[in-house]
Amino acid sequence: MKLHHLKPAEGATKDRTRVGRGRAGTRGKTAGRGTKGWGARHNPKPGFEGGQMPLQRRVPKLKGFTNPNRVEFAVVNVGRLAEVFEGLERQFAPLAQRRSLRLQGQTRQQQAKPGQHPTPQTAPQSHH
């Protein structure tokens, strides 16, 4: 397969809107540009945000800036993680074994499904 064999997935592309095709059409007459004003008469400058201070001017010019949405990551040593989890593994091994037995249905403590009554697994005790 080569680059010229690739094509967008089905439904990923839309035909461009043909504007200014008569009064009856959705995009006729003003063709979605509104009435009068700069936007109706001219091609607006790239980066123009309708009078709002453009991004290019909002961001500081030199020395970078502090991103308010910055996500700080903690450095974690993978070897240290392995040590910790190895210890935990030994600590919780009996629990894990019990859980796997329960999932196989080999223990007394079985979960009842919604709308179902739990079935007693032990013999009924006689009351004196």
Image (cartoon, rainbow, N blue to C red):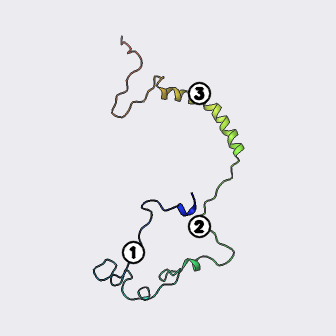
Q: Earlier in the sequence, mark 2 or mark 1?
A: 1
Which residue of the protein is positioned furthest toward the top in this rendering? 128
**Residue carrying label 1:** 17
Q: Quadrant of the C terminus?
A: top left
Q: Earlier in the sequence, mark 1 or mark 3?
A: 1
Please state which of residues 9 and 102 is positioned toward the viewer in this rendering.
9
Other residues around mark 3 within 10 Å, as few (<14) / some (14–19) / many (≥20): few
Foreground: disc 2 or disc 1: 1
Please state which of residues 16 and 2 is positioned toward the viewer in this rendering.
2
Where is residue 14 shown, x and y percent of the image?
42, 68
Instruction: Tell me which amino acid carries mark 1.
Output: Thr
**Residue carrying label 3:** 94
The residue positioned 58% from the left and 78% from the top of the image is 56
The residue positioned 34% from the left and 30% from the top of the image is 116
Provide the secondary structure element on which disc 2 rests.
Answer: loop
The residue positioned 47% from the left and 82% from the top of the image is 50
Q: Is residue 70 above or below residue 53?
A: above
**Residue carrying label 2:** 68
Q: Is residue 77 above or below residue 67?
A: above
Q: Quadrant of the N terminus?
A: bottom right
Q: Are marks 3 and 2 in contact (CB under 8 Å)?
A: no
Provide the secondary structure element on which disc 1 rests.
Answer: loop
Where is residue 95 shown, x and y percent of the image?
56, 29
Left or right: 100, with 125 as reference point: right
Q: Quadrant of residue 96?
A: top right
